[in-house]
Image (cartoon, rainbow, N blue to C red):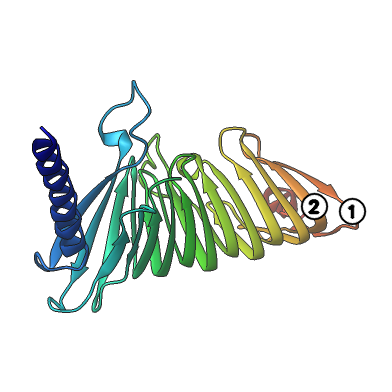
């Protein structure tokens, strides 16, 4: 009986070794120029669909014999940086790409660097680096950040609704909540704005600009202040602090003709 138990232990160990070897081979790119790897993001949660529990990673590389990445089987940490290629991550409703990925399966977070992009249903963004929390569906982007949001309803569905440039940005709720800092520039259909910080909440229909704010409308009006709160549903702007404004006066051509 002791001999049988020994054989069983050896078999189990061999099974783990084989599984680990196959996984490492996949991550090193031995199975072709485009490799899929699937990790369970949170297998302990019940009542969720299978797709929501998965983080799917695809390694794209043209260098078939070069090392593409490593996976720490004990710590459950993957470090992927394919030569002459990039990493693609699919999770829930987001598609992310980068030149380098460090993924921590235990806490469901990732660090991405090098030509980082994120594509969601109605929002796209790009940056030099990004911290991703897949459990909270929150993304923090750094370095030359750019975000574009599209219209979702009406005749303008699909058209650009909002563009934001900054040096730091936090994106939540698939782009419906955006916090941006550092050389912030905003373009909407009716206006442009510059500020040190932006707090944009599409659900509450509010945009709060703070620090060296400058607001310009397409008609040529200019408004500056230390803080400007814009009600996006009514286009009403409330200004705080020292304020300077320039307004373009509209001439009444009919009145001018009557006076003549």
**Quadrant into which the N terminus falls:** top left
**In which image quadrant can residue 216 be found?**
bottom right
Mark 1 residue element:
loop
Q: Which is more toward the observer, 160 or 121?
A: 121
Above or below, 152 relative to 64? above
Quadrant where the C terminus is found in the figure: bottom right
Q: Residue visible at 11% across and 45% down?
A: 11
Quadrant position of residue 125:
bottom left
The residue closer to the viewer here, 219 or 177, is 177
Q: Residue furthest right?
A: 242
Q: Where in the figure is residue 256, as x and y percent of width and height?
A: 74, 54
The spot of residue 199 in percent (x, y) is: 66, 48
> How many neighbours does mark 1 have within 10 angstroms: few (below 14), some (14-19), or many (20 or more)?
few
Q: Are marks 2 and 1 in contact (CB under 8 Å)?
A: yes
For the residue labelled by badge 2, is the local secondary structure a helix, a strand or a loop? strand
Query: What residue would you read off at disc 2?
Result: 227
Q: Residue at x 43, y 44 (%)?
A: 134
Q: Position of residue 223 (x, y in %)?
A: 77, 57
**Pointer 2: residues within 10 angstroms few (<14), some, or many (20+)?**
many
Q: Which badge, 2 or 1, comes first in the chain's sequence?
A: 2
**Residue 58 horizontal side relative to residue 193, left or right:** left
125 w.r.t. 123: above or below: below
Identify the residue at the far top of this view: 47
Q: Residue at x 40, y 65 (%)?
A: 116
Looking at the image, which residue is at 87% across and 57% down? 243
Residue indicated by mark 1 = 241
- Distance, label 2 to label 1, CA atoms, is 7 Å
Where's residue 230, x and y in %?
70, 43
């Amino acid at each position: 009986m002791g001999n049988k138990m020994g054989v069983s232990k050896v078999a189990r160990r061999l099974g783990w070794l084989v599984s680990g070897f196959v996984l490492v081979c996949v991550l090193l790119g031995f199975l072709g120029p485009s490799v899929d790897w699937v990790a369970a993001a949170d297998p302990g949660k019940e009542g969720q669909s299978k797709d929501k529990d998965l983080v799917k990673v695809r390694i794209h590389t043209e260098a078939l014999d070069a090392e593409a990445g490593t996976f720490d089987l004990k710590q459950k940490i993957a470090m992927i940086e394919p030569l002459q290629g990039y990493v693609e991550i699919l999770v829930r409703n987001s598609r992310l790409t980068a030149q380098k990925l460090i993924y921590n399966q235990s806490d469901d977070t990732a660090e991405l660097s090098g030509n980082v992009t994120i594509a969601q249903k109605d929002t796209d963004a790009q940056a030099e680096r990004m911290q991703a929390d897949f459990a909270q569906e929150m993304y923090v982007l750094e370095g030359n950040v750019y975000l574009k949001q599209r219209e979702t309803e009406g005749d303008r569905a699909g058209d650009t609704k909002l563009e934001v440039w900054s040096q730091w940005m936090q994106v939540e709720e698939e782009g419906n909540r955006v916090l941006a800092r550092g050389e912030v520039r905003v373009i909407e259909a009716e206006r442009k704005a510059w500020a040190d910080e932006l707090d944009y909440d599409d659900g509450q229909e509010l945009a709060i600009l703070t620090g060296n704010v400058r607001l310009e409308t397409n008609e040529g009006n200019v408004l500056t202040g230390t803080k400007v709160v814009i009600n996006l549903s009514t286009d009403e702007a409330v200004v705080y602090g020292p304020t300077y404004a320039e307004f373009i006066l509209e001439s009444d051509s009919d009145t001018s003709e009557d006076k003549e």
